[in-house]
Image (cartoon, grey):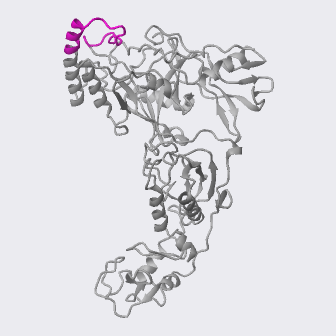
Amino acid sequence: MSRPGHGGLMPVNGLGFPPQNVARVVVWEWLNEHSRWRPYTATVCHHIENVLKEDARGSVVLGQVDAQLVPYIIDLQSMHQFRQDTGTMRPVRRNFYDPSSAPGKGIVWEWENDGGAWTAYDMDICITIQNAYEKQHPWLDLSSLGFCYLIYFNSMSQMNRQTRRRRRLRRRLDLAYPLTVGSIPKSQSWPVGASSGQPCSCQQCLLVNSTRAASNAILASQRRKAPPAPQLPPPPPPGGPPGALAVRPSATFTGAALWAAPAGGPAEPAPSPRAPPRSPGAPGGAPTPGQNNLNRPGPQRTTSVNARASIPPGVPALPVKNLNGTGPVHPALAGMTGILLCAAGLPVCLTRAPKPILHPPPVSKSDVKPVPGVPGVCRKTKKKHLKKSKNPEDVVRRYMQKVKNPPDEDCTICMERLVTASGYEGVLRHKGVRPELVGRLGRCGHMYHLLCLVAMYSNGNKDGSLQCPTCKAIYGEKTGTQPPGKMEFHLIPHSLPGFPDTQTIRIVYDIPTGIQGPEHPNPGKKFTARGFPRHCYLPNNEKGRKVLRLLITAWERRLIFTIGTSNTTGESDTVVWNEIHHKTEFGSNLTGHGYPDASYLDNVLAELTAQGVSEAAAKA
């Protein structure tokens, strides 16, 4: 059996950098919700490296090389991955490995998940498996890496040591990861000077530099007067300006270093005694002195308990996110505030703003129950769900009453006077519909040219319903253009914020990609479906179950989604929400799509009513 090694990382010097004259393989990785670093594919890593060479402070659009990553961009300055349609941010890092290791040879080890798809192992595990495979060991124990699995090379399988369940695994040859030789780019952080080494001349940087100079003078005078403290912040990086202040980040700050490192590179903060470094091979572990830490987002977060415990009582904590406009405190403001507090002799800790809790804790199948009072657990829609009306004129006449003497006011469809002919005269011809005919809608009483309403109906979904263009009152049963898919709903034994004693209704929408039909913007063209399956949440109370029943009706009428252009990514011909808001954030409300939200259930009932979906309409 092979004993897991160190993961194939390159040797590093005292500053955490590999030797400058040694070739190494670059692997970019992102931190998932389980605090495990997941590698990007070799193709994506080559793309990131190419962008990094052109602009070390730029952004990388991952969708340019991988269609499945269209919503994602990487901000090289803050070293974070940003999902544009949900606002989710995740740290990324740039890791180095020996060229003779698995990523240098383009070897990928994968395991088969429950859906039959193949998932790549974390890079350090992949390297460990490949090392054992090359040494012709019959099996490999991954327990020392934190996983209770055994790898059997003879049967190419993975076995869970506790459940004895086996999964298939495979070894696949792919593109080799990018190779780099020579100097290492500086760590990206705010503010970053020009590539020439000269400080940035923008107004923000000038203000920060002047503030830093003033604070340095204050700190120098305080150091002369004050006795030596038992623990001092790390010294400024070599090659930096004399007296440069290094603000010590706490163990909870996972963004990039606050100040850009000069030519000597960033100074590594001392590890927190409350967060001992994990094994270099452990997935998602904090960097250890033996690992390369270039471009890593500072000390990695271990657990929320350790994070909170690392901040001394009475020390102000500044929440920071490193992309403009996405956090409560702009990084420039946080940095200047930290300098001023340090200059005044006050300690300060920089913390990450809290991350949204999108999903509940894992739930076993035995704990998933049907929703009481709601039959079934699943609804499916097909491509042609409702029959279309044959004659637009008959549909319009069904909901209108003829007006013999119309008032002298505008028709809000064609903007011609009601006492004159319709603006669609000569454009649209229907037997029995004269251009001067005017009708009144039965319930709301708004008046239009009959020909104008026929034209409006003909340009719509033609589902036998009519919607008043003035007050949006719906006549008949409105249906939408939602593509075929599946809606599942069930109870889970967890509570939403604001509903402590109530279980949760989880709704799962799943729509696959497909071809647009005649009711869609571009018939015959392929449409995409990003972010599916989508999970949504409701409290299991009387009003929550009422909303669920109406959402099921809206789903069956194809009103939940439509095909259009995404407001967040700008992608066209993709599945988007259709004016009925859902809560997709389970345990927080940082994005506005979660709980607590006292008015949400009433608001979504109003939105459903606006789509013609209500209990009163169902009984009518």
Q: Quadrant of residue 55?
A: top left
**What residue is drawn where x is 50% and y is 70%?**
612
Q: Residue at x 53, y 16 (%)?
A: 277
From the top left corner, tell me how far across and down residue 587 is, in percent.
51, 42
Magenta span has 557?
Answer: no
The quadrant the C terminus occupies is bottom right
Residue 311 percent across, percent down from the top left: 40, 23
Question: x%, y% of residue 547?
Answer: 54, 60
Which residue occupies the foreground of this view, 293 or 337?
A: 337
Left or right side of 59 for 214: left
Left or right, 190 with reference to 572: left
The quadrant in which the N terminus is found is top right
Q: Which sits in the foreground, 77 or 219?
A: 219
Q: Nearer the viewer, residue 197 or 608?
A: 608
Name the chief secondary structure element in magenta: loop
Question: Magenta segment, which residues?
Answer: 217-243
The picture quadrant where one finds residue 75 is top left
